[in-house]
Amino acid sequence: MTRTEFWQGNTACAEGALAAGCNFFGGYPITPSTEVAEHMAAKLPKKNGVFIQMEDEIASMASIIGASWTGARAMTATSGPGFSLMMENIGFAAMTETPCVVVNVQRGGPSTGQPTMAAQGDMMQARFGSHGDYSIIALCPATVQEMYELTAKAFNLADTYRVPVFLMADEIVGHMREKIIIPDSVERVPRRELARGTLPFQAGEDLVPGFPQFGKGYGVHVTGLTHDERGYPAATNPKLHADLVQRLVDKIELAPDEMADYDIVNPDAEDVFIAYGAPVRTVQQVMHDRPGKEIGFLRIRTVWPFPEKALSLFKNARRFLVPEMNLGQMAREFERHTKVPVISIPKLGGELHTPDELVAVLEARR
Amino acid sequence: MSFDDWYRQDRLPHIYCAGCGNGTIINCTLAAVDQMGWKKEETVFVSGIGCSSRAPGYIVTDSLHTTHGRAIAFATGVKMANPELNVVVFTGDGDLAAIGGNHFIHGCRRNIDLTVVCMNNQIYGMTGGQGSPTTPKGCTSSTTPYGCTEIPFDLCELAIAAGANYVSRWTSYHVKELEKAAKAGLETKGFSFIEAMVQCPTAFGRRNKFRQVADHVEYLRAHSILKAKVDRMIEAGETVPENMFVVGELAKRNRPYLGAKMPVKTETKPGAKP
Amino acid sequence: MKLAIDETRCKGCNLCTKVCPYKIFREGRKPNRKGTSVPELDRPERCTNCRLRNLYGRTLCGVCQLTCPDQAISWVEEEPYERKKVAIEY
């Protein structure tokens, strides 16, 4: 039985996590993501989960990695300044292939910035924030419904690929209230357990090793140092390091189609908008005001790894217009995947693009 | 079973220098763990970065070798998510008191059921001998070539003030006492902090006039004074010499704690009080 | 039981020579193939654990094994007829 509710985006995110089986939340309050933590604090103990407010964001990320290794589905929620603090431990999660979910309700930056206004300024940081080469998955919800569904999906992706998954929301989607239809159950894809007798960090064809949970007698040593397939540190071996890092990147970058999640409207149009997160709503308004087949729309939900195949589905595209609440962070990524000119429509300040602004850019470029 | 069964035999000999006190402390901790009768499947060792924190790589159980200073935060996640696991944290003076100071204080405050063994060699050994928050005043290190000008921490006082349930300090000379203290710490519910003063012959000893390993161990023995004796001296009104450090069981309390195992349900006869 | 020093692990720190209550360990004079001077044993039949472990069923003393930073010291069972034997069981 599905039911209909009227929820805030952050509440939907927390409820989506609970529906997916999240049983550990270690967080620290920061506007605009505090409501996720508060909702989890109220609901998790009733489901025999653990909520702990850690002393800072670094400890929050650390605690969810520790919890994940005991088999829990762990998550944390933060915003820009906390995201920067978590970066070292995010690198640790990527290196040790720990599944976890990090919700970043983005706010105006840099530094303390605009705590109560929206932005999308952490998109590049999500992909390249920690030092060294690694790859992650980032999902961008644009509605309260997607906050619920994508959070649940994030746990499945994290467990399948053994990677930290980011839910890059923004203050608009996080704090707005909207109608949401809640499904009666959410699909859960559990972690693949390590087969006894195989080495803990040895991967097969899909480049993802089985998960040796703590407490089951695997005796696994997990380290952030470059490690061999037994998990032992082997930091001075050049070939081993190259192979390990290449595998960490390839397991995501070579499989973008499996995680790809996007909507295509009017694939034959010449002017195509590409949007993710809150600006999707402005583009939808523009499409609604100008019905017809002239304007195309690529609405992306999985922003990293970017589904470049989606761009080639627009065969007649003359220009891609990218409205973003940052100075063109994803526009430069789209640019390198296509020969069609990419026009970035940045907007800083915390307010959403208005339909008139988008139409003005559209008319000017034609 | 002796403590030797807890080592990964294929990984020994370890990377520690000749005469490093860390090897001794790991022996004593593992002997205490062995005496507790814990199973290898139920024990997890967590550590940060540094010489002391390389220890879990040589122990046969599940282990987590984490980022610098955050061992207690990771251990909090492990323990709270699965309280049935026995979690022991190995850390060093820099890892615990410098970058990890905040997590140390909050671990003590929350009184999570962990045991933290800090191998305090008063220097940053792994990175080549820089000063640490516990380097004594006047000692030479690679970042304090003119003698350390800062006043060092007393880690045990910090732990007691922040609320740990069991705090004790011994040196690498007092192996038997350290084993007993480690066992008491493992048994005590709540945050147990065991500080072990150890020798670092390569980084500290070489720069601070301890030419032989045994000289430094002798120095540690000569400058340790039992807590009971210090209490008597204070009562008698004598002053305790400055450069001595107090060894023994410094605190044992019963404050409320987090992350306890579920109590084992026992059968009660009908009519008997539960 | 008799004392055995594992030469692949000993790094020649000589801490055992300082902590044994009977001064059984003496500093080695000759370096071995690895270059470390492994300590020599002076009258190891004086070691309490060697003599009485089988009688009491638990480790006695054992400070050398706990102190050795390289886990190089252990006790092994003796063969009945051996050149160097500790022997005395009360």
Image (cartoon, rainbow, N blue to C red):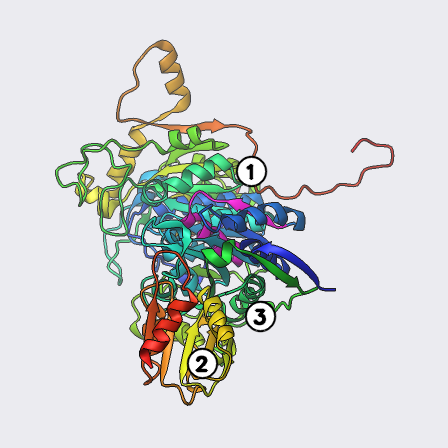
Are discs 3 and 1 less than 8 Å apart at CB?
A: no
Kind of residue sitting beneath label 1: Glu
Element under label 3? loop
Q: Quadrant of residue B119?
A: top left
* Residue B126 picture location, percent across and down: 28, 51
Please identify the dominant SS of the magenta region: helix
Callouts 1 and 2 in the same chain = no
Q: Chain of mark 1?
A: B
- Mark 1 or 2, closer to the camera: 2
Task: Inspect the image, locate mark 3, and give the three-letter code of the amino acid beneath it.
Answer: Arg
Residues at marks 3 and 2 touching, judged by CB atoms closer than 8 Å? no
Q: Tell me the quarter of the image containing the C terminus of chain A.
A: bottom left
Q: Is residue C77 magenta?
A: no
Using the image, tell me which numbered label, if any, was put on residue A295.
2
In the rendered view, would you say A13 is above or below A54?
below
Within 10 Å of disc 1 (Cα), the crowding (few <14, some 14-19, many 20+) is some
Position of B211 with respect to A291 (left or right) is left
Q: Secondary structure at mark 2?
A: strand
* Residue count near mark 3 (Cα–Cα under 10 Å), binned few <14, some 14–19, many ≥20: some
Which sits in the foreground, B255 or B45?
B255
Q: Chain of mark 2?
A: A
Question: In x, y percent, where is residue A219?
Answer: 52, 60
Residue A123 visible in the snapshot: yes
Q: The residue under label 2 is which amino acid type?
A: Ile
Residue B48, image x, y percentages: 38, 50
Q: Which residues are magenta?
A: A49-68
